[in-house]
Each structure stands twice: as structure tokens, then as C-alpha cells.
Image (cartoon, rainbow, N blue to C red):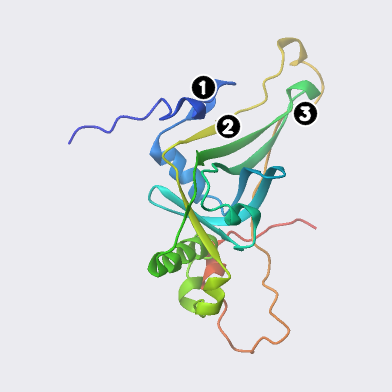
Amino acid sequence: MPKETRQTQPTNERMKVVRVPERGAYDRETIYKTFDDGYLCHVGYESDSGPVVLPTLYGRSEDFVYFHGSPAAGMFRRAKTDVEVSLTVTHVDGFVLARSLFHHSMNYRSVVAIGKPERVTDPEEINFGLEVITENCLPGRWAEARKPNDVELRQTAVYKISIADASVKTRDAAPGDDEEDIDLDIWAGVFPIVTGIGDPIPAPNFTAGTDLPYALGSFPKASIDS
């Protein structure tokens, strides 16, 4: 089979990384992984009152990202317009400490997709989208918990956006100090940022003996030195 060619240019010029272009990536593998490693996105759009950015949970399936919210939210009330959104996910992987404050930075991965979100109306796909979101955040939880009923589904708007127009920008490097600062007696390097989960806190009306969620085993444990 022919070797897959890595995509080195954006599908749309507006997705091109302009500042430090060598940090940009446009191939599906990198875009998918950057989405899949997160669970919280920010959706920006132009409302009747000005620009708005809303945080929401999401999940990816193939070339679409599903997210949800209240039908009463401004963005969802404008479902029949041609409004485009910018959907962003960012991972901060480390603080980069240089010898000079000017060269302090962070190591990160950020993916941006721009497009017109599509309101999901098919009942089967609505449930599928909610399952995708749930499983992205809490693997195994969709099978454990009660599924949404008709009343709850009417109170939930599910959208999907194609990530055909998307790009990733990444920094994963040591500090970039000026040559004249190298000999300064100041620590330089990277403080990695690691996300973990703490001990679960049961609900006050929790039934003793009930199994812990399957998802608990999917997250690294938080480690805080006392």
C-alpha cells in the first residue's frame, strides 16, 4: 500500500499558523489526538450583543466534534442562521522557565476548528452524540447510568461541527535563553503540568456497596506532596 502523506498545509488558508509557523500541524492524526486528549472546549461566536465565548464538554467521532448545551442559550437560539463558530481546545503541558522573564513560555498543544455547527435533530444521532461526549469525558459511564428520557432530551441541544478546517499549534521545547544569559546563576527548565483525579467523594445519599464508576480507572491519580 502507498505510504500515507503527512498533510503539511491547511485545508483553508484562514487555518494557517502564521506566528512561528513551524509549530503548526494540519494532519488528521495530530488534530484527532489533540481533541481526544481533552474534554473541555471553548466555543466562540458573534452574538447579537457582541462576541461570546462559552465553555462546554465535547467528544469527537471521526471528523466531527459533538457538544451540547441548553436550547435557551444564545448560540442555540440562532441555529437557523449562518453563524460560524471557532471551537478551541488547549492543553498546557508545562511552564517554561528561562533565565530572563522575557523568554518564559509554556509548552502546549492547541487545536482550533472553524465552521458552522449543525443542530442534530435525528433522535438516534442525538443519543449517539451524547454518548460520544459522555464516553470522551468518563469512559464506561454511558453504560452505567440511566439514559436521558424524552423530557431531558427536549431540554438539551446537541450540535456537531466538522473539523475539516482545523489546525494544531504546539510548543514542546526547552527555554530559549539569549546567549549572554546562559551563565547567569538562575534556574532554567520546564515545570511539567500533570492532570490527575483525586479520591472520589460520594453523594450524601449514596448507597453503600455500589461499585465505583468504571471511569475512575481511566484517569491518572493526582499526586500532591505534603
Mark 1, secondary structure of its residue: helix
In the rendered structure, find residue 162 and report the number of the disc placed on it.
none
Residue corresponding to mark 3: 187
Quarter of the picture holding the N terminus = top left
Q: What residue is disc 2 on?
A: 172
Residue at point 76%, 10% (across, down):
180
User: Label 3 crowding class (10 Å Cα cut-off): few <14, some 14-19, many 20+?
Assistant: few
Nearer mark to the viewer, of 1 and 3: 1
Pick whichever of labels 3 and 2 is earlier in the sequence: 2
Q: Is residue 149 visible?
A: no
Q: Do the residues labelled 3 and 2 touch (CB within 8 Å)?
A: no
Quadrant (top left, top right, bottom left, bottom right) of the C terminus: bottom right
| Residue 93 in view in this figure | yes
Camera-side residue: 30 or 54? 54
Q: How far is mark 1 from mark 2, CA to CA?
A: 12 Å
- Disc 2 secondary structure class: loop
Q: Which is more toward the observer, 31 or 74? A: 74
Q: Which of marks 3 and 2 is in front?
A: 2
Answer left or right for 36 relative to 191.
left
- Determine crowd level at label 2: few under 14, some 14-19, many 20+ residues with C-alpha closer than 10 A: some
Going from N to C along the chain, the mark reached first, 1 or 3, is 1
User: On the rendered structure, is 1 left or right of 113?
Assistant: left
Q: Name the residue under label 1.
A: 22
User: What is the C-alpha distance between the residues marked 3 and 2?
Assistant: 19 Å
Question: Which of 162 and 150 lies nearest the eye of the viewer?
Answer: 150
Q: Residue 181: x, y in percent?
A: 77, 15
Pinpoint residue 58: horizontal percent, then vertical percent.
Answer: 54, 56
